[in-house]
Image: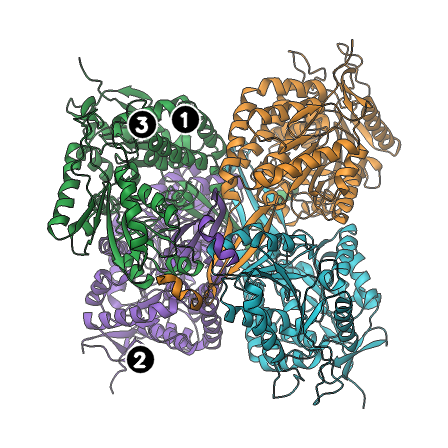
Chain colours: A purple, B cyan, C orange, D green
Amino acid sequence: MSLPICQNYIGGQWMPASSSATTPVFNPSTGEIIATCPVGTCVDAEAAIAAAAAAFPAWRDTPPVDRARVFFRYRHLIEQNFERITALICREHGKTAIEAKGDLHRGLENVEYACGIPTLLMGDTLENIARGVDCETMNQPLGVCVGITPFNFPAMVPLWMFPLGIACGNTFVFKPSEKVPLTAIALVELLIEAGLPKGVMNLVHGGREVVDTLLTHPTVKAISFVGSTPVAKHIHETGTRHGKRVQANGGAKNYIVIMPDADMGKTVENLATAAFGCAGERCMAGSTAITVGAAADKLLPDLITAAKAIKVGPTDRAAQPHMGAVITAAHRDRIASLVDSGESEGAKILADGRTLKVSEAPAGFYFGPTIVDDVRDHMALAREEVFGPVLNVIRMDDLDAAIETTNRSAFGNGAAIFTNSGQAAREFKHRVKAGMIGINVGVPATMAMFPFTGWDDSFFGDLHIQGKEAVQFYTRQKVVSTRWFSEGVGDVWKK
Amino acid sequence: MSLPICQNYIGGQWMPASSSATTPVFNPSTGEIIATCPVGTCVDAEAAIAAAAAAFPAWRDTPPVDRARVFFRYRHLIEQNFERITALICREHGKTAIEAKGDLHRGLENVEYACGIPTLLMGDTLENIARGVDCETMNQPLGVCVGITPFNFPAMVPLWMFPLGIACGNTFVFKPSEKVPLTAIALVELLIEAGLPKGVMNLVHGGREVVDTLLTHPTVKAISFVGSTPVAKHIHETGTRHGKRVQANGGAKNYIVIMPDADMGKTVENLATAAFGCAGERCMAGSTAITVGAAADKLLPDLITAAKAIKVGPTDRAAQPHMGAVITAAHRDRIASLVDSGESEGAKILADGRTLKVSEAPAGFYFGPTIVDDVRDHMALAREEVFGPVLNVIRMDDLDAAIETTNRSAFGNGAAIFTNSGQAAREFKHRVKAGMIGINVGVPATMAMFPFTGWDDSFFGDLHIQGKEAVQFYTRQKVVSTRWFSEGVGDVWKK
Amino acid sequence: MSLPICQNYIGGQWMPASSSATTPVFNPSTGEIIATCPVGTCVDAEAAIAAAAAAFPAWRDTPPVDRARVFFRYRHLIEQNFERITALICREHGKTAIEAKGDLHRGLENVEYACGIPTLLMGDTLENIARGVDCETMNQPLGVCVGITPFNFPAMVPLWMFPLGIACGNTFVFKPSEKVPLTAIALVELLIEAGLPKGVMNLVHGGREVVDTLLTHPTVKAISFVGSTPVAKHIHETGTRHGKRVQANGGAKNYIVIMPDADMGKTVENLATAAFGCAGERCMAGSTAITVGAAADKLLPDLITAAKAIKVGPTDRAAQPHMGAVITAAHRDRIASLVDSGESEGAKILADGRTLKVSEAPAGFYFGPTIVDDVRDHMALAREEVFGPVLNVIRMDDLDAAIETTNRSAFGNGAAIFTNSGQAAREFKHRVKAGMIGINVGVPATMAMFPFTGWDDSFFGDLHIQGKEAVQFYTRQKVVSTRWFSEGVGDVWKK
Amino acid sequence: MSLPICQNYIGGQWMPASSSATTPVFNPSTGEIIATCPVGTCVDAEAAIAAAAAAFPAWRDTPPVDRARVFFRYRHLIEQNFERITALICREHGKTAIEAKGDLHRGLENVEYACGIPTLLMGDTLENIARGVDCETMNQPLGVCVGITPFNFPAMVPLWMFPLGIACGNTFVFKPSEKVPLTAIALVELLIEAGLPKGVMNLVHGGREVVDTLLTHPTVKAISFVGSTPVAKHIHETGTRHGKRVQANGGAKNYIVIMPDADMGKTVENLATAAFGCAGERCMAGSTAITVGAAADKLLPDLITAAKAIKVGPTDRAAQPHMGAVITAAHRDRIASLVDSGESEGAKILADGRTLKVSEAPAGFYFGPTIVDDVRDHMALAREEVFGPVLNVIRMDDLDAAIETTNRSAFGNGAAIFTNSGQAAREFKHRVKAGMIGINVGVPATMAMFPFTGWDDSFFGDLHIQGKEAVQFYTRQKVVSTRWFSEGVGDVWKK
């Protein structure tokens, strides 16, 4: 039986890619191939860019209120198709149904935010900035924008990008991860149903060639990207060198500091979710716990128990586990080898996910919750983003040391503290070098109305995804100074 | 056959009013009574207030994102029921189907605006405002808010008020005009369907007694009102004296200046709509044309022709006229007597709507498009709000004189200029004393994301309906200064 | 020897008042009369209003950048004259040199804020709000504004008002307290030196007749007032009934909750300052301490010791006490009688300031630090604003009870909590019904860039003094909708 | 006699550069060398960076209100030293006294803007973003920032950068143009006098080596640059590749469209200033006039007369010419060769500045006002930034063609239109691809409170110099999500 082949959507038409080369789309829960995704070429990318460019003038001149209305309808359609899309996410990504709902829900909030575009687009005025001169600003769309998205949040990350980009008056080319193209297609189908004019949204599958075309084509004005740090850095450098605005989210290594006065029951619960939720495949995963003083002894026994109680299994069926598979067999093996390397360098495995067997789905890509103690700064396990359900533990004597350790990281996405002390929380949020801070919040990923503020090696660019910064990213400001001469029009007034 | 009697909606229940006294609801197109509206007593008002107060704590603590979601659903339901509601508006108000659609559409935009409440509610922060002290503000809801609405926009004016008031976290008592209660009921029914918790929205029919209770009851925190100037002033004085925040829109007398360089074809078209649209029953009606210099001769012949070509008739059937009836027979007679008085004081009738007969609906409340020339400042016709399809004409020699005349008005809702000159437009918008200015826009009523900024006798209060000012009206700002002492918690950090 | 008589400043001229009636200006430290202040009549007030009205058109059309520059110079002049003005404050008000510096410093921050007026005045734009229609808003000045100020902050409260009011483009009439006119005169003198055009600022001394004229004159557009609650309510009612915008700050009864986990050393220090600073004559005084659980026993002994250690005496000389006199002998006696009444109703005096003798200034108006325990809700001492150095103590069992007690107050200026718990602080700031909240900050009066947000009976009006709300208060928003017709100008383009 | 050698200012000390190599500083009016500027090495740059890094923690923790106060004093000092500094500008740059005043004045406005930093730094809050979770944002400084400035505005461009950068809490390394170091030194001296702590501001002279060190040193967090397009692009690429935030302003080619209905008298006056002011050495110079239809014939005769009437001469003495010298002899020759090439390619010289002789200063670097007609798109004169007093003229048939020509430019700084038509102005501002638009304003350079919004090849980066974008550039946003667990603190509340 032949597998379904994903199609591109260009200029209002679904169509096959220009090349017959494909990559497999797996169901990570079972290891089966469920579809194939075309590799794509510059021909596809250029066609999509051309279609987007052609649609721009009319879409840009559509009043923001009318553009918003497409997203009001889109929001309603996503709500109506919620179960269907989250099932797709479970199937091609492997995360649990609850996690898939969170994925789509977080994305939906971005659609809701885009509905507020008439207010968000407002510029400034100042009457009489100089005698008889008035000044005003406008925020105008850029033109053709591009979104390149990773596998780990098949719905949320694309919805971070195109709803706001399009609501701002831009047209769009969307290049989803070849590992999770089915959710992407479903999202585009609903956008069509919401009444978006042809050419405003375009979908192209592919890999390096497609990406390179998008990064260098003179017609493209802006690139939004989420992926690993080396690729994010490359995307940013290449895109800006070619005259584009770029926002590129990279990897992370997020620290969670646990103070001795924290509510340990709640902390265990939150920490387990932060470290093992979505099988650790998120850039806001809490991958390192820093225990301060007596916190280690109060925390670790219950945490280990909690980790071991997490049931792992297939998520493509009615009975749901606590945690699903990771994205590919190769990725599972990379996680294991990082844990191996830590162990061989002296770290101590408190909970070991490497040996996990899932009998009901033996070919799935599973890796169990893992806790590693005595991790040292120099270990690869400490420095590299693992992107799996692995929690490192570091013990410190006081808050100052914990903050200093956190600040030594090259990354700067998130950091959290668990404490009951107002003072400890204030010190932490004031001093920590990371863009998203949680006070008793283990995964302080920001909601749609606030920017997703990665710092340092977690983000390349100036204007982040989400919130007001994203509106700025997708527009450019024009400042107009106006004066009228009265002499010349005297006669007009009475003629 | 018995007429339907409108019900109150209190604490999540539809129920009859406490008194059996009623007033008739007419179909102005035919003069028929189509329903009756209860007069209501303080018992009804107090019950509604109590229900709203009881619902407040839980609604206030519902996250803004979740409150917004009710209005996303509400928006969808209004869109689905658009035809049904606009037919109700035609039937109980008499305006045309196109005007009814405009009425509901403008209201819908306010629902859309309310969906952006998470962003609109944001407060400010400043870290380290003094050494170690951080400052933040919050915008918190007030409690029980009240909306009292007039007959002329049965959908728009209520939708100016309760969606934003409720989205801000308040609970609400809505007292619609007894002349158009059916639209009000339909709007409330859909809000219930959208999933608003019980008690958050309450509807009470009635007259003076109900209003007085709402104005003076200590539990009520804010009053939004739209009506005539004397009543608006009374509402503002009474409400504020009883410790409430009040925004009260009154009447208007809006001037439209026509410069000789204006595009006369477009000006005629816009002026006719401004003066005769909705049968002149709007507080943004363009009720006085000031022609400058040669503009009078260029404009008036075509304007008279346009006025006479307007077909007036019943709006409760498939074939639609250009203009419908006015709200009651008494109101029609008041309009006629104002025109009579102008005529007897020397004004010249260029088009006369007093004698209009509508054969297919002889008992309807009709008054035809009327143009009155040579109107003088001292005439009642010049000073009072007519609220009917009557356009006064004043001739001036230059723009300065036109602006001065405009600025002598006690009212300050809208003012417009028709011109091609950037300089004339700038002078006009800079100098005219009115809150809403149109440049080649005859009815410069603001859209939902901007405040409806009546000035002077057109508005009583500080914070207007619509836009950011309305968000401020429905919330109060709390400023928090925070400092933590490090000495006292040193031990906490390591304990 | 004759006493100096204060002069009015009207239309750029210093001049005597129209009437020879005067009231004495005391030095509260010694009880001596140091000057006399004219009582003033409607003639003076009307002249000031006329001068302000005449200066308005030119000042309104002065670009905001240039208006700001007057305040940049004013700021510099205040800094240069700092010692001289604070000495005046000490002399006519009686507060200590440190407090006088704080008074002027807080006022200076408002001058600094006014320097930012070009940014603060910005309005909004939205291009293409409908096809071909652009929308913009402007914030325009009102006209003649009035400031009526109390005795307790001779520099700060006037500087809350006129710098921002004038920077917004308004002209001003300033009516200072007849008890502290010398500071007012000095502030006006420096404003003249800063180069403000004649007539923009006017100073009128007087009492009820002057105030009534200002409240009712049709030319006045806005009133800023600070005083007691009954007068504030009267000012608001009268002013708004006469078509003016009014912001009227009234009295307060500010609660400070002390949790058992608070840093007691810091709390005692802050509480003593909050209760006894400025001899308790401030609307943000911490006049009631609510101790929770064990906090009372931890706190009170040291607090009593601290109160008793406060040295009270004259502030008009080099050696400075910790606390100065109250404003008049009559006010001292009123404070004493409120404490007497509390005592007679069963309250327990822990520190008694009634018997204080100050040997080096026996005729000064002194009242010592007083702590009253076992105060009950029904006592006048508990309900009324004492405006003296009297701290009531109420004991509660838990935070919920403390918050409920705080929320029963009719006033709503400030409230503070002392704790180390993030959770207690969050509950408090979220739930307390007061506009200014302190977390470990005893006097959470907001700084100039944030509004001074009294709630309930502490404020009458919608838009507060200070910060962005004050900018809104001193301006009104105009919304302009602009469209240009292309047909009519085709020929213009090539002619 | 030995020439003065400019010194560096590092860590609060004036000191010689590490190398003895220097470049001459000319007086362009006379051709004389008036000082020498050290070439500088990485040693100097590294010392400055180290000093700035050391000063950062304390300065960052200084409250914004206190940081602003340094700039209030700085503003006053600049005002007091206005004549002295503008004389320096005339002397080392050659522009006229009036232009030098404009240069410093525009810079001063940026100092004034920086005084508003407490308001400008405010972040956002949202209470209860999810149940019990509050969200807030802070805008925190970056660390060590760098400003690299060109010769053409010796005061304004540096003042664009360091006042706001430092007010935001950063520390700074300033590398001025080696052609105009004396103004830079004077600006730094006054900043020291204003009381800035040591190490917060550092000044380093030098060329490529110093710049390369600043661009690549890991401690530097942000680079502000103004210069030519190729260098700006290089600065942006190098800086961002090394992990820095960069804003780099490049060159421009600004078009001014003259409609036939424009006020030609005013247009000539404005166009002459736009083209020849500052000898054309500004990135907002109006270097190309596009006449539409009959405008050419109405405009050119008077424009040529005006150009020829411009008196050119030395600006370092009391008698002032209308226009001064260009910066160097080499630059003068480059301008001449571009005009030569245009002439040889067929352009027509209407006014010829190549042959200008200035008898009172024969060795000065003079080039007279030049107007070139019949310029074609392909000519170097049309494409390259001339940066001299040369105005190209292009004739078009209608506004559409004029806009299309404007939009073909690779640059996007400014564009202006002269017209009396509201419609022509609206079309122009809506459609033109340039960041700063003038309607009857020939040099629409934005004032300090609005960003200087170059587009396309005129700017590399996302966040512009000046206004709110610059505040964003000099800070990074941190988003904090806070929750407190009530269970764990129950005992705290009563303990």
* Number of the front mark, 3 or 1: 3
Q: Residue B145 appears at what percent x and percent y? A: 70, 60
**Mark linked to residue A13:** 2
| Of residues A238 and D129, the one drawn nearer to the viewer in this rendering | A238
Disc 2 secondary structure class: strand
What's the CA distance linking mark 2 and mark 1? 64 Å
Q: Residue at x 47, y 51 (%)?
A: A124
What's the CA distance linking mark 2 and mark 3? 68 Å
| Of residues B176 and A314, the one drawn nearer to the viewer in this rendering | B176
Q: Amino acid at mark 2?
A: Gln
User: Would you say D224 lies left or right of C283 here?
Assistant: left
| Of residues D62 and D39, the one drawn nearer to the viewer in this rendering | D39
Q: Chain of mark 2?
A: A
The correct choice, above or below, for A444 with respect to B334 in the image is: above
Q: Residue C287 appears at what percent x and percent y? A: 73, 34
Residue C106: image quadrant is top right
Q: Residue C210 appears at what percent x and percent y? A: 78, 34
Q: Residue furthest left?
A: D344
The correct choice, above or below, for D333 with respect to C242 in the image is: above
Q: Residue at x 78, y 28 (%)?
A: C40
**Mark linked to residue D78:** 1
Does the image show residue A452? yes
Label 3 or label 1, whichever comes before in sequence order: 1
**Mark linked to residue D320:** 3
Q: Chain of mark 3?
A: D
Q: Amino acid at mark 3?
A: Gln
* Number of the front mark, 2 or 3: 3
Residue B153: image quadrant is bottom right
Q: Residue at x 76, y 33 (%)?
A: C392
